[in-house]
């Protein structure tokens, strides 16, 4: 009998977005665009072997440390019943850095749980569970859907889960992405700031229209840069790093929502601002390992 399962999910960086509200969490979400990254999350799920029924528990470990992990915990509650389980997620991207880590962790967990416990959910059903968990816990509005679509540069034309939103993919070449992570940003706090959200929604809608008129990776990067400037989300050190890359012929912007600068092209100057990490745009789905 199989007692453990491992699954992978890519990460996702949103360049710009605008929110769409609904009382139904399946229909609530965001429009916008982002890139799906090879660096992501590996999750191992192991069945608990209790001495008795009372010892059944659900434990979640993030990078080796036991955590609450609200979104993953919500996914466990929605898929599992009384089974005991240990979830161990290892991330190749920073947490709370604008990489959709909560969606990546929850998605890889859900896929492993579905296989290990024979829940017989389809990929779209799993994605919707993760999307609803993200919305309810206020950890994200569109990362789960972008990850589900299958990689590349994903455009979210209408908000909502994979079954209710509208999505498209801009064909792009395999492209390296460099980034520097400066610090954490709370998605929950930003989404709860009405004044900021008004600026975000106004700017995000303009950028989405701009990308649909000219759907290229380069235009996405430039529109994302404009979005960072117009919303005021980028801190001084983030803007300094972005401008340095742009002055050297590269394209850079801020990951939404995190104090992270991501870039394509000539981004070697990011080394002057912190530890430069590299990944690349991927075209893979989340899957069992």
Image (cartoon, grey):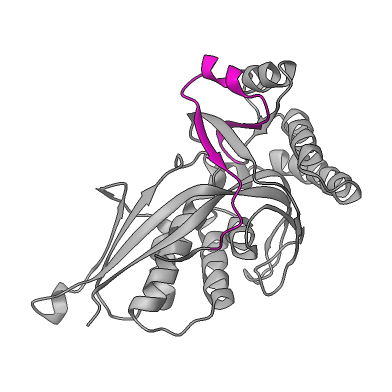
User: In the picture provided, is 131 more to the left or to the right than 57?
Assistant: right
Whether residue 246 is visible, yes or no, is: yes
Q: Position of residue 241 (x, y in %)?
A: 62, 20
Locate residue 251: give its quadrant: top right
Whether residue 192 is visible, yes or no, is: no
Out of 47 and 54, give the one closest to the viewer. 47
Q: Position of residue 57 (x, y in %)?
A: 22, 69
Residue 24 versus residue 194 in the image, above or below: below
User: In the picture provided, is 55 more to the left or to the right than 10?
Assistant: left
Locate residue 262: give its quadrant: top right
User: Which residue shows up at 48% across the image and 53% down it?
Assistant: 102
Image quarter (top left, top right, bottom left or bottom right) of the C terminus: bottom left
User: In the picture provided, is 154 more to the left or to the right than 10?
Assistant: right
Out of 211 and 84, give the one closest to the viewer. 211
Q: Which residues, given as a range, are shown in magenta?
A: 257-285
- As drawn, the residue found furthest toward the front would be 173
Out of 58 and 178, give the one closest to the viewer. 178
Residue 235 versus residue 43 in the image, above or below: above
User: Which residue shows up at 79% across the image and 33% down it?
Assistant: 222
Q: Position of residue 95 (x, y in %)?
A: 45, 42
User: In the picture provided, is 132 more to the left or to the right than 169?
Assistant: left
User: Which residue shows up at 37% across the image and 84% down it?
Assistant: 118
| Membership of 229 in magenta stretch | no
User: Which residue shows up at 60% across the image and 38% down it?
Assistant: 176
Image quarter (top left, top right, bottom left or bottom right) of the N terminus: bottom left
Out of 250 and 88, give the one closest to the viewer. 250
Residue 112 versus residue 210 in the image, above or below: below
Q: Position of residue 66 (x, y in %)?
A: 26, 51
């Amino acid at each position: 009998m199989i007692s453990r399962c491992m699954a992978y999910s890519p990460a996702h960086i949103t360049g710009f977005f605008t929110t769409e509200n609904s009382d139904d969490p399946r229909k609530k979400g965001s429009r916008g665009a982002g890139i799906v990254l090879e660096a992501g999350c590996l999750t191992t799920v192991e069945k608990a072997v209790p001495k008795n029924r009372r010892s059944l528990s659900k434990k979640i470990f993030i990078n080796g440390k036991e955590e609450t992990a609200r979104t993953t915990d919500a996914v466990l509650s929605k898929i599992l019943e009384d089974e005991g389980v240990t979830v161990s997620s290892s991330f190749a991207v920073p947490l709370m850095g604008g990489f959709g880590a909560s969606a990546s962790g929850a998605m890889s967990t859900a896929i492993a749980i579905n296989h290990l416990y024979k829940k017989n959910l389809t990929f779209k059903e799993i994605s919707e569970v993760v999307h609803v968990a993200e919305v309810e816990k206020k950890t994200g509005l569109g990362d789960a859907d972008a990850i589900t679509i299958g990689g590349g540069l994903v455009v979210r034309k209408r908000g909502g889960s994979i079954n209710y939103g509208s999505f498209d993919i801009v064909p792009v070449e395999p492209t390296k992405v460099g980034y520097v992570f400066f610090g954490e940003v709370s998605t929950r706090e930003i989404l709860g700031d009405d004044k900021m959200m008004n600026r975000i929604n106004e700017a995000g809608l303009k950028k989405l229209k701009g990308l649909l008129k000219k759907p290229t990776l380069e235009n996405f990067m430039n529109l994302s840069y404009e979005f960072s400037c117009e919303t005021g989300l980028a801190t001084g050190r983030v803007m300094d790093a972005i401008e340095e890359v742009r002055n050297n012929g590269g394209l850079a912007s801020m990951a939404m929502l995190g104090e992270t600068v991501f870039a394509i092209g000539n981004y070697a100057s990011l080394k002057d601002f912190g530890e430069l990490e590299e990944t690349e745009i991927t075209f893979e789905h989340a899957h069992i390992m």
